[in-house]
Image (spheres, rainbow, N blue to C red):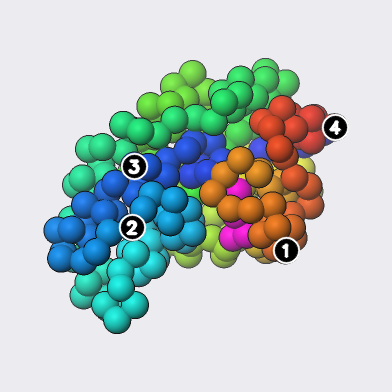
């Protein structure tokens, strides 16, 4: 049995794609660029908001200046509206509670910026105790760099072999591999099972209950 389960946020614990799409489309409109359908954002997210903006911008407009313009329009809108259409995946809250009741520590490791990561965890999981909730912060490399996982392992006081990393993207699977932590790829998120396998997922979870089974085995 593992002692710690580290979760990605977007596409793993929460379906946030609509709010991310609406906020990015708002920023694109403010900056005079064309928008995208919500489903397209499944392939844009996961690498931090600056990379989200680069993906959403027209290829010829992916400059640092435009990224900063997008950021200035996006942040106030997303900070206000980021919980309007987002919600936990069915069964996730119950699995978090069962893992906690079984004595496992829980943590979040996201490429979403820290302020939004903390807000969404507090809003949607107020009764769940996490030993660490870490998002994208200045001076800390984003995933798949393993720094965020190393910080969580240190905070929790567990070794890499005692931890499980759960995420929905190839970047998550690479992060787990880089941190020498066992990985579980969830198939209900923003990316495909093929992407998860291609990036080294040790196991796949097709339902939240699968996470429980894997973590407690």
Which residue is the site of mark 1?
Answer: 198
The single residue placed furthest to the bottom in the displayed view is 60
Q: What stretch is highlighted in magenta?
A: 168-172
The single residue placed furthest to the right in the displayed view is 217
- For the residues labelled 4 and 3, say whether their Cβ atoms are less than 8 Å apart: no
Q: Using the rendered image of the protein, determine whether residue 46 is visible from the camera's viewpoint.
A: yes
Left or right: 171 with respect to 56?
right
Q: Which of 17 and 141 is in front in this view?
A: 17
Image coords of residue 3 (percent x, y):
73, 35
Q: How crowded is mark 4: few (under 14 residues within 10 Å), some or many (20 or more)?
A: few
Which residue is the site of mark 2?
Answer: 36
Spatial separation of the CA atoms under disc 2 and disc 3: 13 Å
Which residue is the site of mark 3?
Answer: 19
Which residue is the site of mark 4?
Answer: 217
Q: In this view, does 117 lie above or below 50?
A: above
Q: In this view, does 125 lie above or below 15?
A: above
Q: What element carries label 1?
A: helix
Looking at the rendering, which quadrant does residue 217 occupy? top right
Image coords of residue 71 (percent x, y):
24, 60
- The answer to whether residue 170 is magenta is yes
């Amino acid at each position: 049995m593992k002692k710690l389960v580290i979760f990605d946020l977007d596409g793993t614990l929460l379906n946030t794609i609509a709010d991310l799409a609406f906020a990015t489309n708002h920023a694109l409109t403010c900056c005079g660029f064309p928008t995208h359908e919500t489903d397209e954002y499944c392939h844009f997210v996961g690498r931090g908001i600056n990379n989200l903006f680069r993906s959403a911008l027209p290829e010829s407009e992916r400059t640092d200046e435009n990224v900063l313009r997008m950021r200035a329009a996006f942040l106030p809108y997303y900070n206000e509206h980021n919980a309007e259409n987002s919600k936990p995946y069915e069964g996730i809250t119950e699995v978090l509670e069962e893992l906690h009741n079984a004595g496992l520590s829980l943590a979040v490791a996201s490429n979403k910026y820290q302020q939004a990561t903390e807000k969404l965890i507090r809003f949607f999981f107020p009764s769940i105790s996490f030993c660490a909730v870490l998002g994208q912060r200045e001076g800390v490399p984003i995933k798949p760099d393993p720094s965020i996982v190393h910080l969580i392992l240190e905070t929790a006081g567990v070794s890499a072999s005692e931890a499980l990393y759960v995420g929905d993207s190839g970047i998550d699977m690479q992060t787990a591999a880089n941190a020498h932590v066992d990985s579980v790829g969830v198939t209900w998120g923003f990316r495909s099972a093929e992407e998860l396998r291609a990036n080294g997922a040790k196991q796949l979870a097709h339902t939240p209950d699968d996470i429980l089974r894997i973590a407690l085995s």
